[in-house]
Amino acid sequence: MAELKALCMKCRKDNKPTMQTMTKPVVTKNEKGRYSAKGVCAVCGGNMFKFMSEADAKPLM
């Protein structure tokens, strides 16, 4: 599986969120047809969320 990166709100540098690797991603599709991934930050263990395109989401489902 490809590495999935997203912004982590807990891991900050100069008061800005940083890109971290998401572990245990769960990809879902909501009632409006948007795909999203929820997971855990590999560095701090905080919750992460990312909206995705269909092309990016399909291989992870």
Image: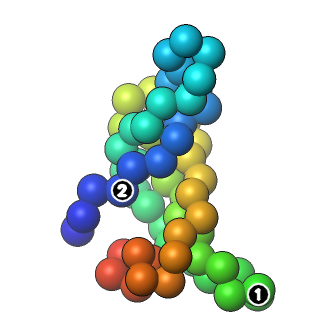
Q: Which mark is residue 31?
A: 1
The structure residue drawn at horizontal position 57% and vertical position 57%, both measured from the top left corner, is 50
Q: Is residue 35 above or below residue 5?
A: below
What colouring does the structure picture have?
A: rainbow
Q: Earlier in the sequence, mark 2 or mark 1?
A: 2
Residue 27 percent across, percent down from the top left: 50, 72
Q: Which mark is residue 61?
A: none
Residue found at the very far left of the displayed protein: 1
Is residue 44 visible in the rendered image? The answer is: yes
Q: Is there a contact, CB below 8 Å, between mark 2 and mark 1?
A: no
**Real-space Cα distance between discs 2 and 1?**
23 Å
- Amino acid tagged 1: Glu
Report the residue marked by disc 2.
4
- Amino acid tagged 2: Leu
Q: Is residue 29 above or below residue 6?
A: below
The structure residue drawn at horizontal position 55% and vertical position 12%, both measured from the top left corner, is 14
Residue 23 percent across, percent down from the top left: 37, 50
Residue 16 percent across, percent down from the top left: 59, 23
Classify mark 1: residues with Cα within 10 Å, few (<14), some (14-19) or many (20+): few
Q: Is residue 1 left or right of residue 12?
A: left
